[in-house]
Image (spheres, helix red, strand yellow):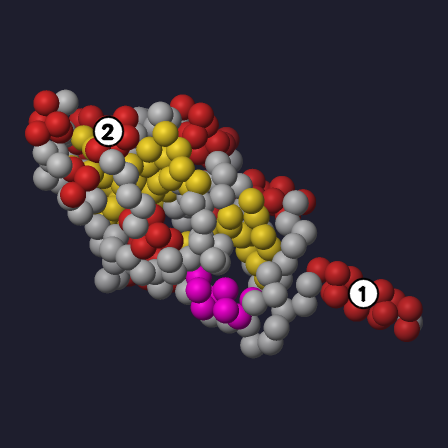
Amino acid sequence: AACLEAVNTAAMDPQFILISRFNWPHPAWNTRPEQEYLDWVQGRLKLFADLTAPSVRNGHGKIDRWLILVDLRKVDIRAELKAITRGLPVQLVEYDGHDLVRSVRSALSDLTFPARVMTCRLDTDDLVGASFVKSYRAVEIDAEDARRGVVLSFPGGAVYAADEQRFYFSSYPENPFLCYVEDRASADDLQTVYLAMHVDMIEVSAHARMLHTFRPAWASVVHGDNVANQSLMGVARSPFAETRKLMRYFGIPAPAKQPQSRLARLKRSWRKLLQR
């Protein structure tokens, strides 16, 4: 603490660290066929290459490091990940499922301390907007608050229905895109954004701030393999009209034509049935 009080960390350029778990060892795979797991990994690589990596590459604002945690015990995908993220400041971290925070501390042990460190979550099948990093970095936080730790959140985001190629509004303060800001004297003192589950971070942290952007800061992607996000479609009832602009904003290719809403597709199906 004495070292931190002697240094004006608020005046330092913070270290902005993205953290993503790629094929972290979920216990569910222990009882599933190995080929099923390998197929899932290949599908995940495609989603990461088509969606997540382009959205990060499309962003404004400096990312100092992107830690991607990988489990290499069944399949080594480091070459594929390096090819997909070429040009981005990626550091692949081998992870066996034990103590994620300790793995992050070890990966960041080469940073110069004392330091202000911003760690931010990003799932490897989701999207971040062009202003995501820049907006987080622009938040002013005094040294006293940062010593205690501050959670930052953009409550306003989107759900991206991949099969429809359409975005729906989402309000989710405890979303899995949170950022945690902390001033620390050493890597061993880091708590990181994985201090708790994202749904609990705001409750367990000393401070939390809700931020706003003109466009959705993030998008949770609903696709065939993501059972957890399927529930989001139940509350995704307000589609954004500017699909093409949002696709550019999230760094993914726009569709050849404006996609139809679920209601429009349902009406079209009914018309076809009535014509039979």
Q: Is residue 106 above or below residue 167?
A: above
Q: Observer-nearest residue: 276 or 163? A: 163
**Position of 184 compared to 25: left or right?**
left
Q: Which residue is mark 1?
A: 267
Under tag 1, what secondary structure?
A: helix
The range drawn in magenta is: 243-250
Find residue 108 and report its image quarter: top left
Residue 193 screen position, x and y as percent: 34, 34
Q: Is residue 61 above or below residue 75?
A: below
Q: Which residue is mark 2?
A: 144
Q: Is disc 2 in contact with disc 1, using a CB cutoff of under 8 Å? A: no
Q: Is residue 132 visible?
A: yes
Q: Is residue 243 above or below residue 237?
A: below
Quarter of the picture holding the C terminus: bottom right
Q: Identify which amino acid the numbered label 2 is placed on.
A: Glu
Q: Is residue 275 above or below residue 58?
A: below
Q: Which of label 2 and label 1 is nearer to you?
A: 2
